[in-house]
Amino acid sequence: MFVMCVVFVFLIRGCYQGNYMVNGEALDAGTIVGAVSKMTFHFIAVVVMLIAALLSMRVFKRDRDEGMQSSILSKPITRRQYVVGKVLGLWVLSTFFMFILHAIIFLTVSVNLNVVMPGYLAASLLCSFNLLFVVVAVLLLSLLMPDIVAFLCVLGIGVISFVADGIFAISHSPMAQAMIQQPGSPSDWTGWRVVYYLWPKLSGTQHFASSFIGGSEGLHGFGSIYPLINILIYGLILGVLLFWRFRNEDII
Amino acid sequence: MIELNAVTKRYGSLAAVDNVSFSVKAGEYFALLGPNGAGKTTIVKMLLDFTQPTAGSLSVNGLPSKHAASRTAVGYLAENYHIPPYLSGWQYLQRCAELLDMSRSEATDQCRRIVELIGMQGREHTKANTYSKGMIQRFGLGAALIGNPKLLILDEPTSGLDPIGIREIRQLLESLKKQGMTIFLNSHLLSEVEKICDNAAIINCGRLLVKDTISALVKDGDTLEDVFVRFVKG
């Protein structure tokens, strides 16, 4: 998947050099760069999240099957050190993948179009908190259920997060607002709103990170930073659960 | 060196280890004997903190077994040892040395010495998926010996070895004993245990049946096998 991602990133270079017409008017270079860069940014971030989940799902099982877990833990190494090593290793590796891919886009735009997007790489690093969430969640769930189910659960959390954000955005459009306010339409959305706000904000964090890329509407107070806080809190809770679960795990 | 104090391990209603107490002194060559499912491996796992006792306490090197520091200077060879198939025996030994924070040159020296000790010269750079079970067992023993441990915990170390291999491992263990190493051995090979161990304990259904010196257990005309069968069959 990483190779496919690299190929995609190199293919996308051509998109920056095309001429685009909307309603008979040619788009300016700045609009093209902003739109293509953001689209590529989101694509890379999502694919690397998938790669991170795939890398994480078999880590404990593989170590157990190959006898590495008992070999490592028979040395004066604590279980906490072992888990921290796994989490950091996977997180750093996947962040490095993502950063490299984003850096290719950044360099392509800087060198070919002489447009520097200083927030692009910072946005990439912000997205790494999503990767941390994915790694910790998959590792924890892989201790509780079969690896593939753990992967699918986290995939489901991600898909719901992206779909819910999409629905939320649509529901805030003027047309949707008008429909909601009509008599006879469901008015009590409180329950769904609570679920929406408490759900892991993978999509929201990605959008918050992408707001650092030039040409975006910018930040708007706590609301825009909330997804990042949400993901950090989830990461922390899942991390504690992961340590607790692994501490009580029998080593085979 | 090792102390078990009224240790019990339950899995639901089943007591895998039931109120077992014994100790192993430094420099002792100790064998833990018992039929399959007696609780031998569970005791080893509790010594290494791979699983926690339901009741009682264990200490290794004078420290509670749940402290990682208790595993300093402890070498462990698991039953059915595995080496990742993509690693060579040499790479595996190097990785084990890295876990003990050795410098690269120190690790290389140790690995070279250990490869000689386990008699695997010439095969150390081939991948583990080409090794026989006996060869993997030797590299496993080699990995346990990295860092010059004071205590070796061996779970069926001769499992999968041919008679010549068993003899070589026995000779190797005897030479380690002469160096003052404490060895805790789980084994089914009673004839080997009789030849090399000082003390033995027999457990069955999680209960300690007897612990004594081999000479006290094996009386004139008997073998350790006779003693073992007598105790286990009740």
Image (cartoon, coloured by chain):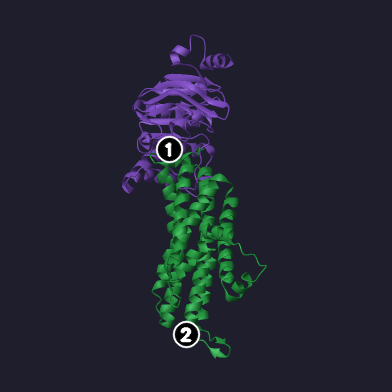
Chain colours: A green, B purple
Amino acid bearing label 2: Ala
Q: Is residue B155 above or below residue B83?
A: above
Q: Which mark is on residue B228? A: none
Closer to the chain start, of discs 1 and 2, is 2
Q: Farthest residue to the bottom: give it.
A: A24
Q: Farthest residue to the right: give it.
A: A184
Q: Is residue A42 above or below residue B150?
A: below
Are tags 1 and 2 found on a single chain? yes
Q: Is residue A163 left or right of residue B157?
A: right
Per the image, label 2 sits on a secondary structure element best described as: helix
In which quadrant of the rendered image does the N terminus of chain A lie?
A: bottom right
Q: Which residue is mark 2?
A: A29
Q: Residue at coordinates 40% horizontally, 82% vertically from top-left? A: A114
Cα distance, mark 1 to mark 2? 60 Å
Whole-percent x, y for residue B122 in the image:
44, 44
Q: Which residue is mark 1?
A: A74
